Image (cartoon, rainbow, N blue to C red):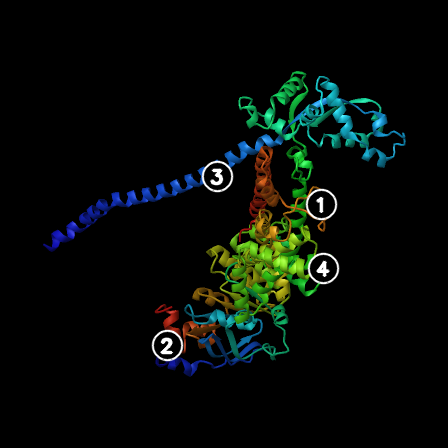
Amino acid sequence: MNQDVSPIEKTAGAPLVTDDPVKLSARDVTVTYGDKRALIDVNIDIVDRQVTSFIGPSGCGKSTFLRCFNRMNDTIDICRVDGTITLDQEDIYDADIDPVQIRARIGMVFQKPNPFPKSIFENVAYGPRIHGLVNEKGDLEEIVHSSLEKAGLLKEVKDRLDAPGTSLSGGQQQRLCIARAIAVSPEVILMDEPCSALDPIATAKIEELIDDLRENYTIVIVTHSMQQAARVSQRTAFFHLGYLVECGDTETVFTNPEHELTQGYITGRFG
Amino acid sequence: MVDSQGGDRPHRTTEIVNAGLKRRYRSERVFKLYGIAALAVAMGMLALLFVTIGTRGLPAFLQTYVTFDVVLAEDTIDPGRTRDPDVLSTANYQALVRQTLRDMFPDVSGRRNQRELYRLISSGAPFDVREMVMDNPSLIGSTVSVSVPMSADFDQFAKGHISRDVPEADRRVSDQQIEWFDRLDQDGRVELRFNANLFTHGDSREPEMAGIWGAVVGSFYTLLITMALSFPIGVAAAVYLQEFAPKNRWTDIIEVNINNLAAVPSIVFGLLGLAMFLNFFGLPRSAPLVGGLVLSLMTLPTVIIASRAALMSVPPSIREAALGLGASQLQVITHHVIPLAVTGMLTGTIIGMARALGESAPLLMIGMVAFIVDIPQGPMDPATVLPVQIYLWADAPERAFVERTSAAVLVLLAFLILMNGLAVWLRNKFERRW
């Protein structure tokens, strides 16, 4: 296997060189599950207020890497993360940093829409409430309304905020989850294949939404669809077998990839 | 050759499949038949149980009463005319009742015959008269019509369980007594009524005065203690083990032991209770408090296992959603996981309670098998519980206790069905879909 991946290692780990302001960066990040290495020496910079997409075949470690940014891997006992990840030059794995604080600054949207079995209002209000972001009831309502508005859901649900979140359609549920993440005013939103459980129309709506959100938030999206990566992201990172093979402007990666593995994947020769 | 083979193949496959089809369907039919037969046997057994207990127990819900006019002579009840409750409660009501009987049958003479006559009615009858007087002292001096239970033997005779055709020496009622009974019956004084004593009295040596209320109250206090202890402790243990405890050798040992404890014979818990709560801590014998403690030890493993299963069934996506928003582990558990698991926890607890309600062996060990007439007023009073009451009555030789045993079983079954029904209802009502 090492014979196979040796060409990868040559380019793997080259940080994305850019003059743009960097929001998140990873240096020599290695993730191990028990004694299996899921990610090996990944180096990457994520640019502020841009959409960065992670692509690659199944099992390449892209979702694992995404979950490193908000320390969701902490919840898995056998998972170990080595290396450094910084948010605004601050090490998020520092012993003094509480994962709760990190997760308030870095929101996450999951593969399968997972609204709480509560009302639409309560779903969105939950984050601000636990963090004590509001003191008055009026403020909370405003946050809920503006979050739903930003997630493009307000028009559809404003008459039935008391209806259970699970009564919405799949696409609406996913936008509800996005609204829920926005309500905490995070700086970064991580999206783990947010459209894989949705139909094309709902997918188009989410993609539009992602495009709108990038004005205010840094977005990292894991996707299986190369078309989606091409449509929504400004930067693309290609992962293979735990290595970051290539990272660059989306246009460059898709039209003129540096690495032959990338070329092979985007032209559909494997994956 | 090759051509014909290629052409034959689909045809031959069909043939082979068809040849085997019959056998396949037959084995399927046979399998279904076994299942149906097993179900039929089980249902038959259940039906047999209900029919036997029902036919035996239902007569106990009725009791033969005799109505007669008692002269509440002031000289006997309250010679000093003080109307002092102490005087009223200690008056000789037995004499009044006996006098009434003698007046109704003036031809009965001789102490021996009179004693035979007195046996027609319950020895508890004077207490009923006393209660009447205590409730309304203005009745003193007048003649009132009173209905009192007949003694158990005549109750059984009235219900046809004792036959006239049996030789006199072989039955518990004499020809003479039957004649008296018939005279009362002809006067329209004998009637079969709802047996209220069964639901209002404690235990008694006289079947017609015996009731299950003492045992029901004892069971209630016992279960109250069991519930109050095993639900919070069990849920707390389950939440800690499932959500917080590290996975190491210690927690493995604890888990294995909890599973083992759930399979320990219940009498062992009774022995433990006897050694710990009675001998070491010196808690009162026969008390629902101790019964509840013992039964909580017994139900705790069940509650913990059921609660852990309920916690485990909460989908991880909900935990991830809350964690991803920045909820702390405790917030994830208290805001999301427990609300979703609480129905399952309650269901498990109710089923554990139902098991505790039907348990008698461990309670025998801590003295809840005593003959207790008084209705317990609290968890520290001596008491018995329904299954132990059934055990006690099943041991009694009187015919009337046989039907009361079955009646008590019916009541216990009703409570058990009620509790299990509640568990099913809770599960269906609060079942959530994700």
The amino acid marked with disc number 1 is Pro
Q: Chain of mark 1?
A: B
Q: Position of residue B405 (x, y in %)?
A: 58, 38
> Mark 1–mark 3 contact, CB under 8 Å?
no
Image quadrant of residue B97?
top right
Q: Secondary structure at mark 2?
A: helix
Label 4 marks a residue whose chain is A
Residue holding disc 2: A260
Same chain for mark 2 and mark 4? The answer is: yes
CB contact under 8 Å: marks 4 and 1? no
Kind of residue indicated by mark 3: Leu
What chain does badge 2 belong to?
A: A
Counting residues from the start of the chain, the first of labels 1 and 3 encountered is 3
The residues bearing labels 2 and 1 have C-alpha atoms spaced at a distance of: 86 Å
Give B289 or B395, whichever is nearer the viewer: B395
The percent position of residue A118, horizontal first and vertical second, equals 61, 53
